[in-house]
């Protein structure tokens, strides 16, 4: 996640968090840069996202990992 909003928030693997409880200003979640860390390395939580925001992040993760299947597809 970055606070630099100039990071092309409209890309399918980016998700703009315009308001997060506990954080100042907007942030962009960069889902093409997924990293796994051990939960013991999490020192503190910095904010909380809504269910709707988490759904948007989850969709961008699916796109990033190639797992996204559109609900409706147009036939050629």
Image (cartoon, rainbow, N blue to C red):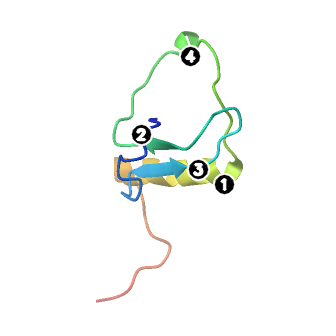
Disc 4: CA contacts within 10 A as few (<14), some (14-19) or many (>=20): few
Q: Which picture quadrant has residue 45?
A: top right
- Mark pair 2, 3: CA separation: 12 Å
Q: Is residue 20 left or right of residue 29?
A: right
Circle 2 sits in a helix, a strand or a loop, which is it?
loop
Element type where label 4 sits in the image: helix
Residue 28 got which mark?
A: none
Work out whether residue 9 or residue 58 is closer to the camera in this orientation and state it: 9
Mark 4 — residue?
Answer: 39
Disc 3 versus disc 1: nearer the observer: 3
Question: Can you tell which of label 2 and label 1 is closer to the viewer?
Answer: 2
Q: Nearer the viewer, mark 3 or mark 4?
A: 3
| Cα–Cα gap, marks 3 and 4 | 26 Å
Coordinates of residue 47 in the picture (x, y in percent): 66, 31
Between 5 and 13, the residue placed more toward the observer is 5
The disc, 2 or 4, on the residue closer to the chain's N-terminal end is: 2
As drawn, 3 above or below 7:
above
The residue identified by callout 3 is 18
- Quickly name the residue at label 2: 4
| Extreme residue in the left direction | 76
As helix, strand or loop, the secondary structure at mark 1 comes to: helix
Q: Is residue 13 toward the left or the right of residue 27 in the image?
A: left
**Residue ID at (38%, 85%):** 74
| Residue at point 38%, 51% (across, down) | 13
In the rendered structure, the answer to whether residue 24 lies left or right of residue 62 reads right
Of mark 4 and mark 1, the one earlier in the sequence is: 4
Task: Look at discs 4 and 1 and give the one toward the viewer.
Answer: 1
The mark nearer the N terminus, 2 or 3, is 2
Q: Tag on residue 52?
A: 1
**Dot 3 or dot 4, earlier in sequence:** 3
């Amino acid at each position: 996640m970055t606070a630099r909003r100039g990071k092309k928030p409209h890309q399918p693997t980016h998700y703009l968090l315009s308001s997060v409880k506990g954080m100042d200003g907007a942030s962009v979640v960069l889902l093409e840069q997924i990293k796994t860390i051990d939960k013991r390395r999490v020192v503190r939580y910095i904010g909380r996202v809504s269910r709707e925001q988490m759904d948007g992040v989850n969709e961008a993760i699916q796109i990033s990992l190639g797992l996204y299947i559109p609900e409706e597809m147009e036939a050629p």
